[in-house]
């Protein structure tokens, strides 16, 4: 039951995040530049992401279907991202500097997010 709820949330989030990547490229660039200068926000953001990822990861106890597996993997990835943000601020700063590639192709990544979100929503709605 938890995995279905998490999959509904993650699918909806991926669709919205994908649209945001496609429509707000300049705002994202500015936001990343601001984050690079203020590590306390990165740390706080990392702590929040870590707790969310652990909650998702620990809430799913079975691997009985595709939705459980996808949600569990998302929980692991979210936890890892939060851990990196908190423990390795210099690495995070380097990753932000190198994110120009990601921002250059943000429309493509946005489309991938949208398609994955639609697939996830298709599985659970």
Image (cartoon, helix red, strand yellow):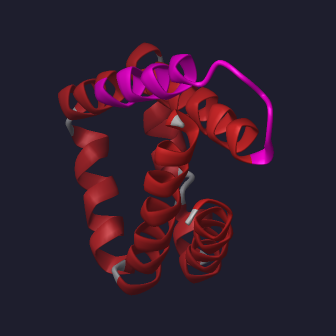
Does residue 54 belong to the magenta stretch? yes
Query: Camera-side residue: 59 or 14?
Result: 59
Q: Can residue 91 be seen in this view?
A: no
Give above or below for 106 relative to 82. below
Q: Is the magenta stretch mostly helix, strand or loop?
A: helix
Q: In this view, does 24 lie to the left or right of 54?
A: left
Is residue 41 positioned above or below 11 on the image? above
Q: Horizontal placement of 55 versus 115: left or right? A: left
Does residue 15 appear left or right of residue 122 in this picture? Answer: left
Residue 58 image offset from top left, x and y in percent: 54, 16
Rendered-image quadrant of the N terminus: top right
Q: Is residue 58 magenta?
A: yes
Residue toward you, 76 or 62? 62
* Magenta segment boundaries in residue numbering: 48-66
**Residue depicted at x 64% and y 62%:** 120
Number of numbered discs on residues: 0
- From where the camera sits, is residue 30 visible? yes
**Which residue does the image show at 65% across and 70% down from the upper left?**
122
Q: In which quarter of the image is residue 49?
A: top left
Residue 17's quadrant in the figure?
bottom left
Residue 61: image location, x then y, percent: 65, 18
Residue 69 at what x, y percent from top left?
Answer: 75, 37
Is residue 58 rendered to the left or right of residue 19? right
Q: Does 24 appear above or below 14?
A: below
């Amino acid at each position: 039951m938890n995995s279905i709820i998490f999959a509904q949330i993650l699918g909806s989030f991926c669709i919205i995040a994908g649209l945001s990547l496609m429509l707000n490229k300049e705002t994202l660039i500015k936001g990343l530049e601001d984050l690079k200068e203020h590590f306390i926000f990165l740390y706080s953001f990392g702590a929040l992401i870590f707790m969310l990822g652990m909650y998702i990861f620990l809430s799913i106890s079975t691997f009985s279907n595709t939705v459980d597996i996808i949600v569990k993997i998302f929980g692991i990835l979210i936890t890892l991202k939060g851990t990196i943000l908190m423990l390795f601020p210099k690495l995070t700063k380097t990753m932000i500097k190198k994110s120009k590639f990601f921002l250059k192709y943000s429309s493509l990544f946005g489309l991938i997010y949208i398609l994955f979100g639609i697939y996830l929503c298709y599985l659970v709605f």
